[in-house]
Amino acid sequence: GGHQPLKGKRLLLTAGPTREALDPVRYLSNHSSGKMGFALADQAQRMGAEVTLISGPVSLPTPQGVNRIDVESAEQMLAAVMDNLAGQDVFVGCAAVADYRPVAVAEGKIKKSEAAMTVELVRNPDILATVAQQAKRPFTVGFAAETHNVEQYARDKLARKGLDLIAANDVSQPGQGFNANANALTLYWNEGAKDLGHSDKADQARQLLETIAQRLPADENA
Ligand code: PMT
């Protein structure tokens, strides 16, 4: 019921952190809780969208009516995104994807010694840029988590990754960003910007999705 500006639209989302294994018991990761991405999935579903949520390891319940696929690593997240991309109208990359992974995963638990230890890392694939590069792509939305020069770095990501829109958050401020219940997003697209103020993640999600709905191309078959 209610206001359904995404009715009939299919929306694919990533949320949460990724885990990059070092050995069978250890991994590299980050502080993403999944709250922002799960709020987006929940609100998009309420606004009428058919939602597929690809999530890294988080401890959150699946929003009602949302199709959820769980993954661990960036490579698994990329594979799940590509498997589910056909027919999507919107892609939102809200996951905090690890930029690097250990070059090799040790088969057994790594043993300690007195010597210092070095872990060699290699770049992970960029899921968002990969989606944006597809010939037939959905309306593609990224996030930018920055600690300084927020607008400059966000606009640089918008252009470099070829996105339709980017949602930037200053993750250096308390009470917003990673693991907080609230956020303060600023949206950027080529011809404009919109400051969403500071509010809980459900409200931030609703405002972001309203802006996406307004900016979606008109239905070709309508
Ligand atoms: O999960 P919460 O605790 O609620 O916190 C929310 C959040 C802070 C994680 C979220 O609001 C957010 O900012 N998500 C993006 C975090 C991030 O990794 O930002 P980035 O600036 O490093 O990456 C830019 C964009 O590229 C993001 O859309 C990211 O999903 C994407 N990316 C990055 C690297 C990579 N290898 N693949 C990607 O797709």
Image (cartoon, helix red, strand yellow):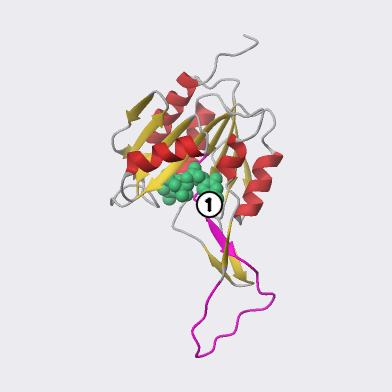
Residue 135 lies, with reference to residue 168, above or below; the image says above
Please give left or right for residue 19 compared with residue 135 in the image.
left
Q: Report which quarter residue 104 is drawn in.
A: bottom right
Give the residue at x 50% y 28%.
46
188 over 58 or under it: above or below: above
- Measuring 46% from the left and 36% from the top, which residue is drawn there? 158
Residue beneath the point at 42% across and 39% down: 156
Q: Where does residue 127 sit, x and y in percent of width and height? A: 59, 45
Secondary structure beneath dot 1 equals loop
Q: From the viewer's perspective, is residue 2 above or below residue 196?
A: above
| Magenta span includes 117 | yes
Instruction: Check the image and name the residue furthest to the bottom.
Output: 114
Cβ of mark 1 under 8 A from ligand 1:
yes
Seen from the viewer's position, the closer of residues 218 and 156 is: 156
**Residue located at (42% from left, 43% from top):** 144
Label 1 crowd bin: few (<14), some (14–19), many (20+), radius 10 Å: many
Q: Nearer the viewer, residue 143 or 156?
A: 156
User: Can you say which quadrant of the picture contains the C terminus?
Assistant: top right
Q: Is residue 39 visible?
A: no
- Counting the numbered discs, the total is 1
Name the outermost residue toward the top: 222
- Please, what is the three-letter code of the amino acid marked with disc 1? Val
Q: Which residue position holds label 1? A: 97
Q: Is residue 173 left or right of residue 60?
A: left
Where residue 220 appears, x then y in whole percent?
A: 63, 12
48 sits left or right of 106 in the view: left
Picture coordinates of residue 120, whole percent (x, y): 56, 70
From where the camera sits, is residue 89 visible?
yes
172 or 48: nearer the viewer: 172
Residue range highlighted in magenta:
93-119
Chief secondary structure of the magenta portion? loop
Q: Within the magenta stretch, is there residue 199?
A: no
